[in-house]
Image: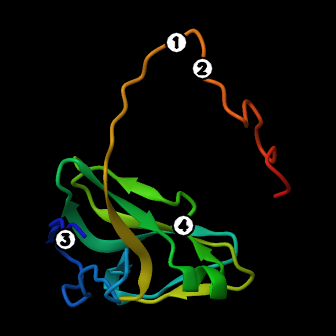
Amino acid sequence: MTQVTIRVLREDGFDPSVPLPSYETPGAAGADLRANLPDRAALVLEPGTRALVPTGLRIEIPEGYEVQIRPRSGLALKHGITLPNSPGTIDSDYRGPLGVIVMNAGDAPFTVEHGARIAQMVVAPVSRAAFEVTGALGDTARGSGGFGSTGTG
């Protein structure tokens, strides 16, 4: 396992007692991100709505890495809370506020509490491709079969 250092800056005006991203178990791939809400006031998401939830953080990701923002499975299963752009990518050259787009795909209002774990972030290496025009592509067993071409669902 490779350890990468992500430098974190707390934004002015946000609650400094909200914990930094953290891994909750030794085998966790994602570090939990927490809501850092203005005035510590809870945010209610009605069914079908979405909101940008602030974390009160800015991060510096080393060149050659990205951070992916992903939903927390428990929130998705129990409440229908997801991230509509999942996985969201934060590039190594971004220095702005770290916010999480949270959506309520459930059937009941959901309250995002101040300090609640709302998403997880995964640090991943980046590979860059070179793109070149060609006159033909190699053959495969699948060929040009598209959506659903390998079976049902």
* Mark 4 Cα shell of 10 Å, populated few (<14), some (14-19), many (≥20): many
Residues at circles 4 and 3 in contact by the CB criterion of under 8 Å: no
Q: Is mark 1 on a helix, strand or loop?
A: loop
Mark 3 — residue? 11
- Closest to the camera, between mark 4 and mark 3, is 4
Mark 1 closeness class: few <14, some 14–19, many ≥20 residues within 10 Å? few
What residue is shown with label 4? Answer: 83
What amino acid type is highlighted by mark number 1? Thr
SS class, disc 4: loop
Mark before the other along the chain sequence, 3 or 2:
3
Q: Mark 1 points at which residue?
A: 134
Q: Which residue lies furthest to the right in this view?
A: 152
Does residue 20 lie above or below 98 as drawn?
below
* Quadrant showing the C terminus: bottom right
* Residue occupying image coordinates x 77% and y 44%: 147
User: At 36% from the left edge and 69% from the top edge, which residue is drawn?
Assistant: 121
Q: Judging from the image, what secondary structure is the residue with disc 3 in? A: loop
Question: Which dot marks residue 137?
Answer: 2
Q: In the image as oriented, which residue stretches furthest toward the top?
A: 135
User: Is 24 positioned to the left or the right of 112 in the image?
Assistant: left
The quarter in which the N terminus is drawn is bottom left
Front: mark 4 or 1: 1
Counting residues from the start of the chain, the first of labels 2 and 4 encountered is: 4
